[in-house]
């Protein structure tokens, strides 16, 4: 995004949401391979059931990766100054995650103009999966 496009943001702006395809077992297997996180709770149904779960569930970091894609749809990754999340609830197979953001504030810090964004990931039932924030340089 060019600097002229970045200047269009104002405090209180709601950013264009990003929705992802439903999470499949294939998605979980591919993410396990890409991330190196082969915890059986995410890929082995028998294991998940043995620990009291109905089914496997998505890696929390998968939702965080989706939020990362959301941020890089707004700006180049080199402009991301901080990025934090809190995991709120388990993401089930079949969930359609939506990443949203709201501009909290725009400030000047030394030689940079910074935008703080409140981040949220919800599923198709509006169940909150992740809550966070990011600071990006404009």
Image: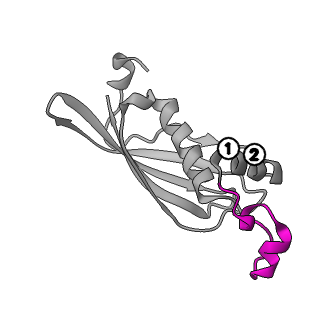
Quadrant of image for the C terminus: top left
Residue 65 as seen in the image, left or right of residue 132: right
- Judging by the rendered image, the residue that carries numbered circle 2 is 30
Q: Is residue 49 magenta?
A: yes
Q: Is residue 15 above or below residue 43?
A: above
Where does residue 70 sit, x and y in percent of width and height? 53, 39
Q: Count residues near mark 2 (Cα–Cα under 10 Å), then give few for <14, some for 14-19, many for 20+.
A: few
Q: Is residue 136 above or below residue 52?
A: above
- Residues in magenta? 37-56
Secondary structure beneath label 2? helix
Q: Count residues near mark 1 (Cα–Cα under 10 Å), then give few for <14, some for 14-19, many for 20+.
A: few
Residue 118 as seen in the image, left or right of residue 89: left
Is the C-beta separation of discs 2 and 1 under 8 Å? yes
- Judging by the rendered image, the residue that carries numbered circle 1 is 34
Secondary structure beneath label 1? helix
Residue 109 as seen in the image, left or right of residue 3: left
């Amino acid at each position: 995004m060019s600097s002229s496009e970045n200047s269009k943001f104002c405090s209180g702006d709601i950013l264009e949401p990003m929705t992802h395809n439903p999470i499949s077992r294939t998605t979980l297997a591919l993410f396990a391979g890409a991330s190196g996180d082969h915890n059986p709770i995410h890929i082995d149904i028998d294991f998940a059931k043995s620990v009291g779960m109905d089914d496997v569930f998505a890696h929390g970091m998968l939702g965080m990766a989706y939020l990362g894609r959301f941020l890089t749809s707004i700006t180049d990754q080199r402009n991301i100054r901080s990025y934090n999340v809190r995991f709120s609830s388990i993401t089930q197979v079949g969930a359609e995650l939506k990443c949203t953001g709201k501009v909290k504030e725009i400030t000047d810090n030394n030689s940079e103009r910074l935008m703080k964004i409140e981040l949220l990931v919800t599923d198709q039932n509006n169940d909150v999966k992740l809550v966070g924030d990011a600071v990006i340089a404009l």
